[in-house]
Amino acid sequence: MPTRRTFLTTAAALPAAFAQQGSFASRRPAAADRKFTSAAVEETISTVSKAIADPELAWLFSNCFPNTLDTTVRYSENGGQPDTFVITGDINAMWLRDSTAQVWPYLPLASRDPKLKSLLRGVIRRQAQCVQIDPYANAFNFGPTGSEWAKDLTTMKPELHERKWEIDSLCFPVRLAHAYWKSTGDASCFDAEWRKAAALTVKTFREQQRKTNRGPYKFQRSSPVASDTMPNGGYGNPARPVGLIYSGFRPSDDACVFPFLVPSNFFAAQSLTQLAEIHATVLSDSAFASECKAFAQEIREALAKYAVVEHSVHGRIYAYEVDGYGSRLLMDDANVPSLMSLPYINSVAPHDPVYLNTRKFILSSDNMFYYRGKAGAGLGGPHSGLDMIWPLGIIIQAITTEDSKEIAACLATLKSTHAGTGLMHESFHKDDPAKYTRKWFAWANTMFGELILKVHQTKPGLLRG
């Protein structure tokens, strides 16, 4: 079984006949082989594709937007309730982060498609079950089947695929449940099991503030890849307890250098705010709502004090990681949550001056993981190696700007770097898009569809050519 650790693939360029004839063969599975079909999604594909003048861009959208439903979902009913297991693609496991991101663009369609609505409720239910199995795990098996990572030096269980503690793993399920409620008006997802998972989420966040001790979590792995394990007996590098939450790993699944991962702490504060709203307005639990609200404020105050640093070129910017002692890591990574994605996850305003300075830093040669080459320019990260640009980074860049020229440039790069596959990848080489990692990566595919939908709604002229 492949792991989330990347592997490099070389592909042929897009066949010239496709481009010359303007005819693109679908990269979707045959209808009978698709895991799930939504009438609302199919209608959206048809409507939006017709509004895209560029046939290759329309082809990419029609391949990518339904990829999660076509290839990665396992939907059933359990005790009369929906249950949806979502794999990432070429890894047969469900990440809490990826599964949320993969179904996220379908939320606006749920109210007019009962089947799709049930599938989304099933994801929420499955995520709540996963959190209760282990709030420190990032990825889960369909059942207690064991894992190739069973020998990791941590408290593994047969239901776990991997047990890397990432703050965002607990944030994404809150984001999905909150948005489902807001999109559909259906509060039935906030049942007793979901409430248990929410309480466990807050408890875990509290433990990882590490105010009085290091908490129950530690992790080590025998690996030649340094970022696959944590130092200091598996507890990671030290940090001063200042109110921020300690994260062992980034959303890339790479170990943090400094324990306070800034974008994930922003995300946690937003999740706590959403939990406060749900418990105050739906669940009539004012005490828990007040606790969540106060916790979110504590994190935001600590971020304002410790996460903003002075850059010699770009002025006041957000650091990527800090430790409360004054150490800081200035970079960004394409995986979400990232500093670039802060407005996307509703953690800062898009015109926040510190964010805008940070954005200029991210998209410059001052950021060690921003690459510019023959194939294009974009944000990468250490996970897949140097000089590898991530489509996720380009997509987030486009989603978080209102600049039409910047959006058009991002679309052009995404269109020219799929290496003839008709789908997005984890990353591609800055000088040669035929060298890429992960040929089946549903998060990137579905999020490309999300970008096209946003452009169709807000700047349709960019699609009309």
Image (spheres, rainbow, N blue to C red):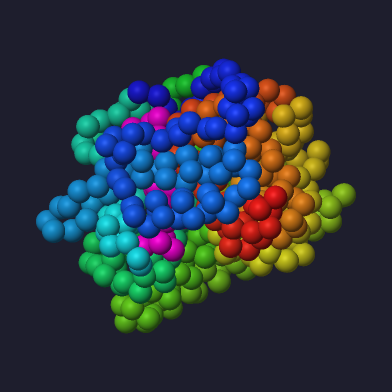
| Residue at the outermost left position | 79
Instruction: Name which residue lies at 35% across and 67% down.
Output: 111
Q: Position of residue 455 (x, y in %)?
A: 62, 56
In the image, taking residue 313 as reference, residue 45 lies left or right, namely left
Q: Quadrant of residue 227?
A: top right
Please identify the residue farthest to the right as the structure is shown: 313
The magenta region covers: 88-110
In the displayed orientation, state which residue is furthest to the front: 21
Name the dominant secondary structure of the magenta segment: helix
Viewer can see residue 332: no
Residue 433 in view in this figure = yes
Q: Nearer the viewer, residue 451 or 262?
A: 451
Considering only vertical position in the picture, is 201 above or below 435?
below
In percent of width and height, residue 399 lies at 63, 54
Q: Does the magenta run of residues contain 98?
A: yes
In the image, residue 441 sits, relative to residue 261, either above or below, namely: above
Image coordinates of residue 449 in percent, x first then y, are 52, 48
Q: On the picture, is 463 further left or further right than 424?
A: right
